[in-house]
Amino acid sequence: MNEPIVARHWLALAAPKAAPAVATSTVLILGRIWNANGAEHSVGNAALMVVLAAGAATAGAFASAGRAGDPVIAGAAFAASGGLALAGVAGYADGLPLPLLLWALATAVAYGLAARYWRTDHRDHLAHHRHSVERREEHAHVERVEALRAGAQIEVAREGAQYAQALAQALTARAALPGFDPAQLTRAGLPELPAVNTTKEDW
């Protein structure tokens, strides 16, 4: 009934917490590599990133609109829009201050959005753990009750067997007494006793 306890490695625990910073840092690094390879002050490249970022933001807005909106798709679209904007600035700017400022802002926003999902996941995990504990306790209680009931039945059966054995021994001993007459007891109004065949070897 007990569920196995699996100890997760510290890297598995730390990876989700580091994912937003790793993602924004990767975008910043790729943007600076793109800057070093000809994207600096390139209006065409900047316009391309603006169009892509605006398209991703528009897709996120449509995905989140209405009752049938999908928050996962909307979040992915807005994250892509922010990443494209950060990459475009990092590729177009000639210095690091503005890209680093946008990187810090994007990282803070990413952690703010991720914290919401982490809280929801934590609440779901606690609810599942609480439900599992309650279910194990309920099963353990049922097992204890069944064990007590089985023990009581075994004890009653043992006592019944001992009583039947003692009664049989008493009837046998009384039938072996000299002058014992079951018919005389029946005439006296006592319950009829089973007949016992006695032979000479019994005397």
Image: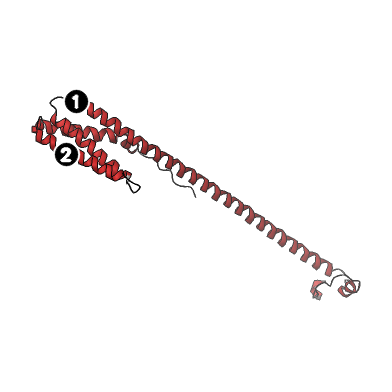
Image mark for residue 51: 2
Q: Can see residue 12? A: yes
Residue at 10% in and 33% down: 43
The residue at which mark 1 appears reads as: 98
**Occupied quadrant, residue 190:** bottom right
Of all residues shown, which one is farthest toward the front?
66
Q: Is residue 105 left or right of 92 when viewed as pictured? A: right
Q: Amino acid at mark 1?
A: Leu
Quadrant where the image shows the C terminus = bottom right
Q: Amino acid at mark 2?
A: Val
Instruction: Please name whichever residue, 146 or 63, is drawn nearer the observer in this view of the structure.
Output: 63
Task: Tell me the distance, in whole angstroms, between the alpha carbons under discs 2 and 1.
Answer: 20 Å
Question: Which type of secondary structure does the marked residue at label 2 adopt?
Answer: helix
Residue 5 in the image, given as x and y percentages of width and height: 43, 43
Residue 79 in the image, given as x and y percentages of width and height: 26, 38
Residue at 27% in and 45% down: 62
How many numbered discs sit on the rendered protein? 2
Instruction: Please name whichever residue, 193 or 91, is drawn nearer the observer in this view of the structure.
Output: 91
Q: Is residue 178 left or right of 50 when viewed as pictured? A: right
Labels 2 and 1: the sequence-earlier one: 2
**Occupied quadrant, residue 35:** top left
Q: Is residue 45 above or below residue 154?
A: above
Give the colouring mode of the picture. secondary structure
**Occupied quadrant, residue 88:** top left
Q: Can see residue 10? A: no
Residue 105 in the image, given as x and y percentages of width and height: 26, 29
Q: Is residue 29 above or below residue 55?
A: above
Question: Which type of secondary structure does the marked residue at label 1 adopt?
Answer: helix
